[in-house]
Image (tube, rainbow, N blue to C red):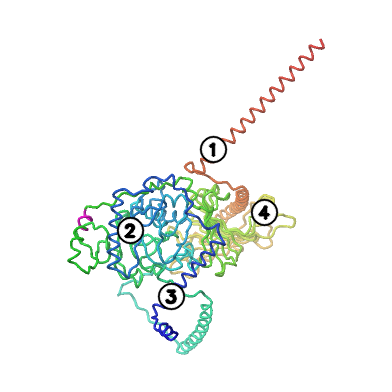
């Protein structure tokens, strides 16, 4: 007997061994699930305890048409299981929350919610993924035995992948999309909502657009540069050394991969449900999938989707008859192709394409099926209308916030008005996969009165960058800083089209300031100011710009080319050395020029400077203008030019002081805004209505309390007057 048993064990096929291993693995999964349920009861939800007494009668019974539909579905399922015995059972008529069998197509309830974002597939997908809590399937390799109505799923805000898909499909069909629920197979990461190996969508770089070369065959072909044979030999040696180092790194990676978890033993068997959107309706250019757990769209050739059993919508049910050994890459989604998709209720006179074993015996059945298929109409959905209140739509997260873990990143989401500072999203980027060392933090805000919508914090450089929407009183667009203290390094960007001077950027430190301009009539595009050290005893904080003025050492301005002027009359660079009392002009170059024209006005050595005096001589004037006209050689012209420059230097000093005062004002305003954050609420928001009701109640309470106090004071005064009057009468 022992020998026979040994022979039987030896004669086991590899498929039997794999099936045994999978069955053992499933038993371990069930034991782990039981232990997990015993350990953490808070995370589990008991669906058997839900109240179904107030549900409509359509949830508890089947109409005559629904019973006929179930009979046809059973007949179709029997034929399918008989003709395709190797295929797994179809997901056709599971039980609903009342324990009644319902056809899956009637569970789809097309609904268009009255919100602008819900008219688009992206809004519907993001709402479903945020609004519901994901529950894994009890058995990862079989579909669930029950499928609850979308209204119940919306009420309790949780469900498995089939619940997610039916709800999302209902919203998409209601919005006019050609959408279908899909019963198929996917990878472990997709079925378990594990995104730790994926890159965060916020961090994905846009695809680079290849630069198209000029196809002109008549363009000049320049000769190739000569190459050194010695350098080529050295490069070959370096490449060999690099290959050896790469091989060593690969060996180290192999050692690291050994520590990683092994391949999923249930790969290709894990059941998953998602949504298919066909091209055509709503101007959808290409067919794509939607993962209801994440709300992200995927290509139909994505390797995460491993196969499809069937699809359905509110009109019909289709079975996939194509080979899925290579996943969904080669699948055709032409549902009118009877060789690729077997439809349950044919919409034409074509017969079913399922193979038959005895055509003579089944002719009568096929004729009956044709008659029934042509005459049968899908009953209306038994599900009540899906309703989502305005408050529920604005606060979609059932646990207060949503946390998503990515590769070296963590994303957190909150509902609007959930945080006092208006924070709705935070993305933390880490240096390692264990998420221990923070590199960068990005935060997004909504409904802020100061119009701040994003903040970036770089932990390596300690720089903070605030981004603002248009409409700020100071016309701010972005502000980069390390501290809100003055002269600690600030870079401010403005909406230059709203400013008179065209300033779009200003950066300031303790020793210099640089301003950038755009679209100015004088073609000024940059101004750079150098400051000196303050006198001893001057304090930077707590005073005005004039009291704490830094001495201006130099002012340098840069201008664009003005084609209306000759190059030797069009100034490119203008330098005012205030302390040295030197003015330098550099002009633009012509196409054929090499050295630009220059004019330098300097102070005469040994002569004291007097206010309002302009002294000009050939000693303090240096000029180089090889192509200038006669007027540039005239001293009177240079005198007038120097007079204008002196006046402009005085105006420039005042502009610099105004810029310093503006920077101080920006810092004080931003400090006050951060100390007292206020949110603006729309009149169409549910939160606004609640806030108004609360404020009205508070005002009523205050008014009632004040009126009671006044009445008590009046009654007290009357009592005092009465007692005083009685006292006077008694004395008389």
The residue carrying mark 4 is 549
Q: Are marks 3 and 2 in contact (CB under 8 Å)?
A: no
Q: Which mark is residue 20?
A: 3
**Residue 581 visible in rendering:** no
Residue drawn at x 30%, y 75% is 217
Direction top: furthest residue: 732
Secondary structure of the residue carrying numbered label 4: loop
Question: Quadrant of the image for the C terminus?
Answer: top right
Residue 440: x %, y % from top left: 56, 63
In magenta segment, residue 372: yes
* Mark 3 / mark 2, whichever is N-terminal: 3
Q: Are marks 2 and 4 in contact (CB under 8 Å)?
A: no
Report which residue position mark 2 lands on: 312
Mark 1 or 4, which is nearer the eye? 1
Instruction: Give the spatial CA distance, label 3 vs label 2.
Output: 33 Å
Residue 693: which disc? 1
Answer with mark 1 or mark 2, whichever residue precedes in sequence. Answer: 2
Label 1 and label 4: CA atoms lie apart by 51 Å
Q: Position of residue 396 (x, y in %)?
A: 48, 51
Q: Nearer the viewer, mark 1 or mark 3?
A: 3
Q: How far apart in space, not on screen, are marks 2 and 4 (Cα)?
A: 75 Å
Q: Nearer the viewer, mark 3 or mark 2?
A: 3
Q: Nearer the viewer, mark 2 or mark 4?
A: 2
Residue 319: name its quadrant.
Answer: bottom left
Q: Position of residue 146 (x, y in %)?
A: 40, 57
In the image, 22: left or right of 678? Answer: left
Q: Which span is picked out in magenta? A: 369-374
Q: In whole angstroms, how far apart are the C-alphas of marks 1 and 3?
A: 65 Å
Compare marks 1 and 3 and give the one earlier in the sequence.
Answer: 3
Q: Are marks 1 and 2 in contact (CB under 8 Å)?
A: no
Q: CA distance from mark 3 to mark 4?
A: 84 Å
Question: Is 76 inside the magenta-drawn segment?
Answer: no
């Amino acid at each position: 007997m022992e020998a026979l048993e040994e022979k039987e064990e030896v004669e086991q096929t590899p498929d039997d061994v794999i099936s045994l291993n999978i069955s053992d693995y499933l038993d371990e999964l069930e034991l782990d699930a039981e232990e997990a349920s015993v350990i953490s009861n808070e995370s589990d939800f008991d669906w058997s305890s839900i109240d179904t007494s107030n549900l409509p009668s359509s949830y508890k019974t089947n109409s005559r048409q629904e019973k006929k539909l179930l009979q046809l579905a059973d007949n179709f399922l029997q034929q399918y299981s008989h003709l395709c015995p190797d295929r797994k059972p179809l997901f056709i008529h599971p039980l609903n929350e009342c324990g009644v069998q319902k056809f899956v197509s009637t569970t789809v309830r097309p609904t268009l919610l009255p919100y602008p974002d819900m008219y688009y597939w992206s809004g519907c997908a993001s709402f479903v993924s945020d609004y519901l809590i994901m529950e894994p399937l009890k058995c990862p390799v079989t579909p669930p035995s029950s499928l609850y109505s979308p209204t119940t799923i919306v009420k309790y805000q949780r469900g498995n992948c089939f619940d997610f898909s039916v709800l999302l499909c209902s919203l998409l069909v209601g919005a006019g999309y050609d959408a279908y629920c899909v019963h198929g197979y996917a990878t472990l990461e997709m079925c378990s909502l594990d995104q730790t190996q994926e890159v965060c969508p916020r961090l994905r770089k846009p695809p680079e657009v290849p630069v198209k070369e000029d196809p002109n065959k008549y363009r000049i072909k320049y000769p190739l540069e000569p190459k050194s044979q010695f350098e080529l030999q050295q490069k070959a040696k370096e490449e060999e050394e690099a290959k050896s180092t790469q091989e060593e790194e690969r060996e180290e990676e192999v050692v690291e991969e050994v520590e990683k978890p092994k391949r999923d033993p249930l790969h290709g068997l894990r059941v998953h449900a998602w949504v298919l959107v066909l091209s055509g309706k709503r101007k959808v250019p290409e067919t794509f999938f939607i993962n209801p757990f994440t709300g992200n769209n995927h290509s139909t050739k994505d390797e995460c989707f491993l196969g499809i059993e069937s699809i359905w919508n509110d009109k019909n049910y289709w079975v996939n008859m194509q080979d899925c050994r290579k996943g969904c890459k080669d699948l055709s989604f032409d549902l009118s192709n009877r060789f690729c998709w077997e439809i349950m209720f044919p919409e034409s006179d074509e017969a079913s394409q399922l193979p038959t074993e005895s055509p003579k015996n089944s002719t009568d059945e096929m004729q009956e099926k044709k008659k029934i298929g042509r005459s049968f109409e899908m009953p209306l959905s038994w599900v009540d209308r899906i309703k989502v209140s305005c408050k529920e739509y604005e606060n979609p997260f059932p646990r207060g916030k949503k946390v998503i873990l990515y590769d070296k990143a963590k994303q957190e989401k909150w509902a609007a008005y959930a945080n006092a500072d208006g924070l709705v999203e935070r993305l933390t980027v880490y240096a390692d996969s264990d998420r221990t060392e923070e590199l960068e933090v990005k935060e997004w805000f909504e409904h802020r009165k100061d119009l701040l919508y994003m903040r970036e914090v770089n932990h390596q450089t300690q720089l903070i960058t605030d981004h603002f929407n248009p409409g700020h009183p100071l016309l701010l667009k972005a502000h980069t800083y390390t501290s809100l203290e003055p002269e600690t390094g600030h870079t401010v960007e403005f909406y230059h089209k709203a400013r008179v001077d065209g300033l779009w950027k200003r950066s300031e430190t303790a020793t210099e300031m640089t301003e950038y301009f755009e679209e100015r009539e004088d073609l000024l595009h940059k101004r750079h100011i150098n400051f000196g050290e303050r006198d001893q005893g001057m304090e930077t904080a707590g005073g005005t710009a004039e009291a704490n003025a830094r001495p201006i050492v130099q002012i340098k301005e840069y201008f664009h080319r003005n084609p209306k002027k000759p190059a030797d009359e069009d100034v490119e660079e203008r330098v005012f050395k205030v302390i040295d009392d030197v003015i330098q002009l550099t002009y633009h170059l012509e196409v054929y020029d090499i050295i630009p024209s220059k004019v330098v006005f300097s102070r005469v050595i040994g002569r004291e400077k007097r206010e309002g005096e302009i002294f000009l001589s050939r000693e303090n004037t240096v000029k180089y203008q090889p192509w200038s006209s006669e007027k540039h050689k005239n001293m009177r012209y240079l005198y007038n030019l120097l007079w204008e420059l002196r006046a402009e230097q005085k105006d420039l000093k005042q502009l610099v002081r105004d810029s310093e005062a503006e920077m101080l004002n920006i810092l004080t305003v931003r400090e006050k805004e951060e100390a007292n954050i206020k949110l603006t609420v729309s009149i169409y928001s549910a939160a606004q209505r609640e806030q108004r009701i609360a404020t009205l109640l508070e005002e009523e309470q205050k008014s009632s309390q004040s009126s009671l106090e006044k009445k008590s004071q009046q009654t007290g005064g009357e009592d005092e007057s009465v007692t005083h009057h009685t006292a006077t009468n008694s004395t008389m």
